Image (tube, helix red, strand yellow):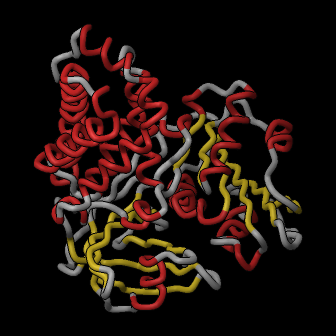
Amino acid sequence: MPTALDDATRAIIRATVPALDAHGLAITTEMYRRLLTTPEIRDLFNQSHQKDGEQPRALALAVLAYARNIDRLDALGGMVERIAEKHVGLNILPEHYPFVADALLGAIGHVLGEAATPAILEAWGKAYWFLADILTGREAQIYRAHETAPGGWRGWRPFVVRKRTAETAVITSFELAPQDGGPIARHKAGQYLSFNLNLPEHGPQRRNYSISSAPGADHYRITVRRARGGVVSQWFHESVQQGATLLASNPSGDFTLPDSPSGSSVFLTAGVGSTPVISMLQELATRPTAKIRYVHSAHSAADDLFVEDIRREAAEGALTADLFYTHAAAPPSEGVTAHEGRITADWLRATVERDATYYVCGPEGFIRDMTQTLREIGLPPAQIRYEFFGSATDVELVL
């Protein structure tokens, strides 16, 4: 365990909260500017999140949350676990951490100027390495678990696209089997694969995509929405055909089902937020006592990912479903309730199941609205799980 921060260091960190509130984004933007001049570090990042400012905003919130909670770091446990899982997926290693330390402290000094006294820089150096030690320790545990699991591996493993399926006009699934023909690790439903890609004219890229296949299969399936202006998602749709080889790391992520779920499970999703959830539903189908409700919002049935799977499972009595379509009414079917419009806070309040665990996935605004409503209703945090794609820019979601 890392040595606890001393009182003097924590006092200085607390005192810097107003400066971080005012200048946090400028500090993290400068930090990334410095990091991205180092090739071995630059290629670890999602360049799209740099261009739109998403990553600096997310990190600014994380740094602010760390400073605000410096006296009660147990409140950051969920954030630390998500970061560690993402780092392992991207193959972040201990030797990368000094680059970040230099960039962060340099950015603090650059942005705050004379206000960044030697005492402040020393305190933030200690605080950074305290958190880094926690992260690298947890990441080492995850790496070992991956490497020693049946079918597991460490680093990047080549996978071949065995099958490609158009799900909708803008969403395509890719079935991946290991190039070496060996077994693969059984993923936890809800996890993702990270990919090390090299795109013509765009260079190295790292991306995460949720696994949409059932745990225990001889392959993984990812499902990719073609995002407007999305360099990597467009490349997948235009260039990744059957027989292509992709480098992937071991499945990662903490948006997963408990080993022994109790009570009901409600899946609250919008758009491609259903991609990790479909794997969860397939896993729960092996547990005949599970009580499942699926609530999903899409534009129309033509845009609704895996809708036929949901209708079939509902007809078989495996789950009940509420389908909300904003542009066209959902056709009725057994076990499915059709709705026009979006999932609203009022509807959620009127239908809440207080013994259920809610799994929320979709655009950040949707997650924020749904989780806030569930909190207001009085559901305890342990019954509210969520996954966001990309980097959260809302402090409540970061924590």
- Give the residue displayed 36% in from the left and 63% down from the top: 46
- Give the residue displayed 49% in from the left and 75% down from the top: 230
- Give the residue displayed 71% in from the left and 63% down from the top: 316
Residue positioned most to the left: 95
Residue positioned most to the top: 7
Question: x and y percent of residue 182 in the render?
Answer: 20, 73
Question: x and y percent of residue 21 in the render?
Answer: 48, 31
Residue 97's image quarter?
Answer: top left
- Give the residue displayed 22% in from the left and 22% down from the top: 123
Please tell me whether residue 35 is drawn above or below residue 310 in the rendered image.
Answer: above
Asked whether 189 or 385 is in front, the reply is: 385
Would residue 131 appear left or right of 271 to someone viewing this image?
left
Residue 318's image quarter?
Answer: bottom right
Would residue 2 appear left or right of 374 to someone viewing this image?
left
Would residue 79 appear left or right of 322 to someone viewing this image?
left
Please tell me whether residue 269 is drawn above or below residue 386 in the rendered image.
Answer: below
**Quadrant into which the N terminus falls:** top left
